[in-house]
Image (cartoon, grey):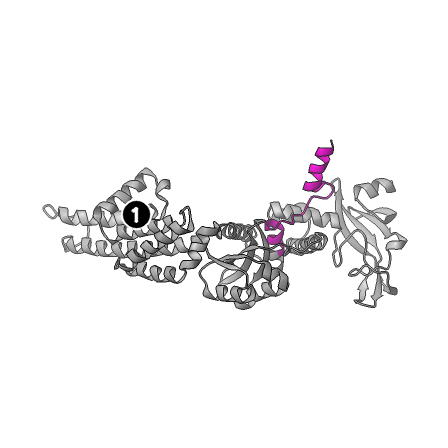
Amino acid sequence: MNRILLLALSLTATIIKGLRIDAGAIVVSVCPHKRRQRLCPICGHRCEFYDAKAQPRRWRAMDLARSMCYLEYRPARVRCPEHGVHVEAVPWARHKARCTRDFEDWVAWLTVHGTISAVAELARIEWHSVGGICKRVYDDLEAARGQGRFEGLRRIGIDETSHKKGHRYLTVVVDHDRGCLIWAHAGYGKEVLNRFLDELTREQRRAIEIVTADGAKWIKALVKRRCPNAGWVMDPFHVVSWINDALDGVRREEWQVAKRAARDAAPKRERPGLPAKGDETPAEAKALQEAAETIKGSRYALVKNPSDLTDTQKEKLDEVRRAGSHLFKAWELKENLRAVFHSSSAKDARALLDAWLRRASRCRIPQVVAVNKKVRHRKDDIIAAVELGISNARVEAINNKIKVTVRMGYGFKNTDNLIALLMLRCSDNKPHLPGRPVKGEKEKVKKVA
């Protein structure tokens, strides 16, 4: 029976001393092997006995069939010369955990693929315990990976994303080469980004070759100071978003003007309701109303890629083109700026961007002129994005995963637990199901077979 329990609960370096049923749960009395007793939970060295717990402690283990299972043991406290007094390490659980390793690995894997509330219901634990489990599992995976997650960094992306109402942000850093999240921290600004750079060694900072981010000048100045060999790349997504916002501002302004003109051209009626006989709206006023409605409904036709337009949106765009207003000129400038990022070489991109800057500076559209000034200051960074063929798209994709994670959990009170869950979901260090081979080991087994 003891051998069956050891296999079913995946216990190593453990002796089973007894078995009983307590309040519908299976309680297994265990004890570590003698060579695994009195170990410091931090350094793993054997230490002198300090005192013993008055009552035995229980650790939640994997269920046996449909019954909850616990491991029971009375641990001692040991005095480590380096780390002080701590409860001794046990082979079946992590330090400061009240669940076994297999149980925590199982919960972490489920949390990566589902919602916290569903995992808490399935595992029969409190939902706020899931966050602490994810943090311990991730810390253990990081300690076991051998090299740090910052090794080999060459190209990184930096961005901020909101995780809570009230302008609560997370600063995230992504490795473009591995396509994964490598660092996240609550807050944004110089102090937060400096924390990430402080975690890198001098050699790691000097090894960074490319940094992508939005147009924040303070990020560029800080990265250039701390990472002297890094080339700065302006993210094309943010540049196009500037011109899209300007285009939408022109559309709203044109719509207000057209709506005001239609209202002024409409006949003044003494009372509301249907017009009296002979008091119909004149054709000129109707034409102005239709023009205002066309501008109002042209938002998606203007900001979408021309190749993705529906037939209705193409008709809207044709109507705007026939009107020949500032709105269509702003749309053309938007498409000309997008064409810069589709250039085949940096030389062609520079020529197109110079032509766009000249035309945008003379267009007499205030919103586009404001974008022209921002683009002119970041001209070299935009050309670098075309030359290197890199953008912040991977960072934006991970930001979407972060928003989905926050939405699935209906928010997180503990930011540390949220970051641990995000690292499990978005990094390259994934949890695995207990009792199953890791992905790399699976492929080795197939090759041998």
Residue 178 x/y as whole percent: 59, 49
- Nearer to us in this view, 70 or 186: 186
Q: Amino acid at mark 1?
A: Gly
Residue 357 visible in the picture: yes
- Nearer to us in this view, 245 or 163: 245
Q: Is residue 431 magenta?
A: yes
Badge 1 marks a residue whose secondary structure is loop
Say whether residue 130 is left or right of residue 154: right
- Nearer to us in this view, 299 or 58: 299
Residue 414 visible in the picture: no
- From which residue to which does the magenta span run? 420-449
- Nearer to us in this view, 48 or 391: 391
Say whether residue 144 is left or right of residue 239: right
Toward the top, the furthest residue is: 449
Image quadrant holding the N terminus, namely top right
Number of callouts: 1
What residue did someone put label 1 on? 297
Residue 128 x/y as whole percent: 64, 56
Say whether residue 274 is left or right of residue 125: left
Q: Is residue 108 magenta?
A: no
Image quadrant holding the C terminus, namely top right
Q: Residue at x 14, y 55 (%)?
A: 268
Q: Is residue 412 above or below residue 444?
A: below
Residue 378 x/y as whole percent: 41, 60
Toward the left, the furthest residue is: 278
Which quadrant of the structure image shows residue 444? top right
